[in-house]
């Protein structure tokens, strides 16, 4: 409805607030309401860190975080962190 992706809650898929009906049971007089709870689907994210080392593996400059919490499979470009 809002363009976001939701998944059924793994920890509490059926709401059990006062007045809610359980997932299974017997029909009673009147209306029973079962509420399935969904949570926003978390998309996997990653970081890109540029490290600077000489040919012997010694650190020659502090690392630079090029991307933070970027969605997986998104392109990145570290050329702006490449020394001349």
Image (cartoon, helix red, strand yellow):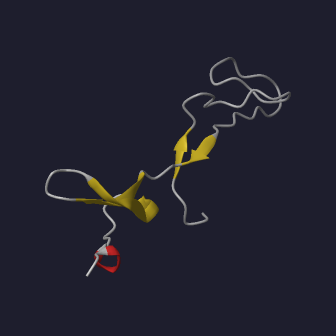
Residue 26, placed above or below residue 34:
above
The residue furthest top is 25
Rendered-image quadrant of the C terminus: bottom left
Rendered-image quadrant of the N terminus: bottom right
Relative horizontal placement of residue 4, taking residue 26 as reference (left or right): left
The residue furthest right is 18
Relative horizontal placement of residue 62, taking residue 1 as reference (left or right): left
On the image, the x and y values in percent for residue 75 come to 30, 70
User: Which residue is rendered at x = 69% and y = 17% of the image?
Assistant: 26
Relative horizontal placement of residue 36, taking residue 6 as reference (left or right): right
Relative horizontal placement of residue 43, taking residue 27 as reference (left or right): left
User: Which residue is rendered at x = 63% and y = 25% of the image?
Assistant: 23
Residue 14, placed above or below residue 82:
above
User: Which residue is rendered at x = 81% and y = 29% of the image?
Assistant: 17
On the image, the x and y values in percent for residue 55 come to 14, 57
User: Which residue is rendered at x = 34% and y = 80% of the image?
Assistant: 80
Which of the 4 image quadrants contains residue 34? Answer: top right
Observer-nearest residue: 52 or 27? 52
Residue 3, placed above or below residue 47:
below
Q: How many marks?
A: 0
On the image, the x and y values in percent for residue 46 come to 40, 54
Observer-nearest residue: 84 or 4? 84
Residue 61, placed above or below residue 21:
below
Observer-nearest residue: 59 or 78? 59
On the image, the x and y values in percent for residue 22 come to 70, 23
Which of the 4 image quadrants contains residue 31? Answer: top right
Which of the 4 image quadrants contains residue 32? Answer: top right
Observer-nearest residue: 65 or 11? 65
């Amino acid at each position: 409805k809002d363009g976001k992706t939701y998944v059924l809650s793994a920890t509490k898929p059926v709401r059990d607030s006062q007045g809610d009906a359980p997932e299974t049971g017997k029909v009673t007089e009147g209306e029973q309401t079962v509420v399935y709870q969904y949570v926003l689907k978390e998309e996997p994210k990653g970081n890109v860190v540029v490290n600077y080392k000489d040919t012997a593996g010694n650190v020659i400059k502090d690392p630079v975080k090029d991307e933070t919490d970027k969605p997986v499979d998104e392109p990145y470009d570290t050329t702006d962190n490449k020394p001349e």
